[in-house]
């Protein structure tokens, strides 16, 4: 059962409610260098990113948002800390603000940001992070899931006190169990949409594992409306991993999904080579298609039957499956051509 949160619009993308879980990523260019940022945004869009966030550390970056927004297709989010004037400037151009009201300052400044977001009809994401908790909350609750939740509730109240309810929430930590626990608690306390992520999760390898476990387990629990895989790597990789997570938990399908066996002494075909060549040759196909590449007939037929198209290695001719049925026997050098041909 999916947790049904309040529906919210981020530009032309609806999140929450029954809408698909959306993929976010973040640029790592200097936002004030609009040309470079736009170039990276286009690469992210091409990779399948559905919402793009940029950091806005200074007024030059806030002003550059106008040009950036005019040259992109997916919704743009401005990530702002401390300076409410940056948020007010950014609100003129972007589709969502990410702030922590608690570090914006006085009630008047928070009200000014909330009023700007209201005027431009854009939501605000409260992005609570265990690494930057309010001192009083850290003192009272330590670096715990409860502290993340208390901080989120406090920040929500700061916006709600200004009659602002168009809110998205995230409660991130680099520790997977703490993050998961915090999201589980908050998901029962509020109806706002939740943006999931494991913060500072690390390199491509370790970050992929941490994010997959953290984000994946929450999604399997029905929690989450948008996701961002944070990696110390090219942001394109974040989008690729996010897509794989959503496919793995059965929430979305993107293009060709290749299932392949790990191979063993029984394998009659070079599964790894075939699988990676098929992934490469079908990477631009958007139609959701399941492909199975299996080394032999032990588990092969079962997996191949589940797929739209599959091959099972066999002595005396490999078996080509289509929609669960064996359609022909093929040789080694026909495998790639037959599989790729059937994905078009
Ligand atoms: S499908 Fe066959 S070759 Fe592949 S791992 Fe299983 S037993 Fe080994």
Image: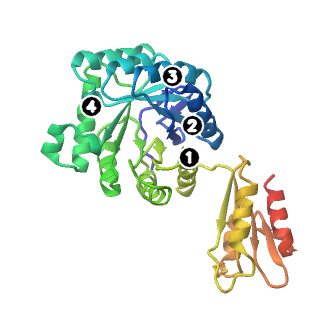
Residue annotated with mark 1 = 239
Q: Position of residue 16 (x, y in %)?
A: 46, 36
Q: CA distance from mark 1 to mark 4?
A: 29 Å
Mark number for residue 41?
Answer: none
Looking at the rendered structure, the secondary structure element under dot 3 is helix
Image vertical order of residue 108 relative to residue 257, above or below: above
Checking the image for residue 50, the label placed there is 2
Give the residue drawn at x 52%, y 28%. Answer: 76
Q: CA distance from mark 1 to mark 3?
A: 22 Å
Label 3 crowd bin: few (<14), some (14–19), many (20+), radius 10 Å: many
Circle 2 crowding by C-alpha within 10 Å: few under 14, some 14–19, many from 20:
many
Q: Is mark 3 within 8 Å of ligand 1?
A: no
Q: Nearer the viewer, mark 1 or mark 3?
A: 3
Q: Which residue is label 4 attached to?
A: 155
| Labelled pair 2, 3 in contact (Cβ < 8 Å) | no
For mark 4, give the secondary structure.
helix
* Sequence-wise first label, 1 or 3: 3
Q: Earlier in the sequence, mark 4 or mark 2?
A: 2
Q: Hey, which quadrant is residue 289 in on the image?
A: bottom right
Residue 181 image position (x, y, % from top left):
30, 52
Q: Nearer the viewer, mark 3 or mark 4?
A: 3
């Amino acid at each position: 059962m999916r947790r049904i949160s309040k529906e919210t619009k981020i530009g032309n993308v609806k999140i929450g409610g029954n809408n698909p879980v959306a993929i976010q990523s973040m640029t790592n260019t200097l936002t004030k260098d609009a040309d470079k940022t736009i170039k990276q945004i286009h690469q992210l869009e091409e990779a399948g990113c559905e919402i793009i966030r940029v950091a806005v550390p200074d007024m030059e970056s806030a002003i550059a948002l106008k040009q950036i927004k005019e040259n992109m297709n997916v919704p743009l989010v401005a990530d702002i800390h401390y300076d409410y004037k940056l948020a007010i400037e950014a609100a003129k151009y972007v589709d969502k603000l990410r702030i922590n009201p608690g570090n914006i300052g006085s009630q008047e400044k928070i009200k000014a940001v909330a009023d700007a977001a209201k005027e431009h009809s854009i939501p605000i994401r409260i992005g609570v992070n265990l690494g930057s908790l309010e001192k009083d909350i850290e003192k009272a609750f330590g670096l715990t899931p409860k502290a993340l939740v208390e901080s989120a509730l406090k920040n929500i109240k700061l916006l709600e006190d200004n009659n602002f309810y168009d809110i998205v929430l995230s409660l991130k930590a680099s520790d997977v169990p703490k993050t998961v626990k915090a999201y589980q608690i908050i998901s029962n306390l509020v109806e706002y949409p939740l943006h999931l992520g494991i913060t500072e999760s690390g390199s491509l390898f370790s970050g992929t594992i941490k994010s997959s476990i953290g984000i994946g387990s929450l999604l399997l629990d029905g929690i989450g409306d948008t996701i961002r895989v944070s990696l110390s790597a090219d942001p394109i990789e974040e989008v690729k991993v996010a897509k794989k997570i959503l496919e793995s938990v059965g929430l979305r399908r993107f293009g060709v999904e290749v299932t392949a066996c790990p191979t063993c002494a029984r394998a009659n075909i070079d599964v790894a080579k075939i699988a990676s060549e098929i992934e490469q040759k079908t990477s631009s196909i958007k139609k959701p298609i399941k492909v199975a590449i299996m080394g032999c007939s032990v588990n092969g037929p079962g997996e191949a039957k589940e797929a739209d198209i599959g091959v099972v290695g066999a002595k005396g001719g490999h078996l080509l499956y289509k929609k669960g049925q064996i359609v022909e026997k093929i040789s080694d050098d026909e495998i790639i051509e037959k599989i790729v041909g059937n994905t078009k």
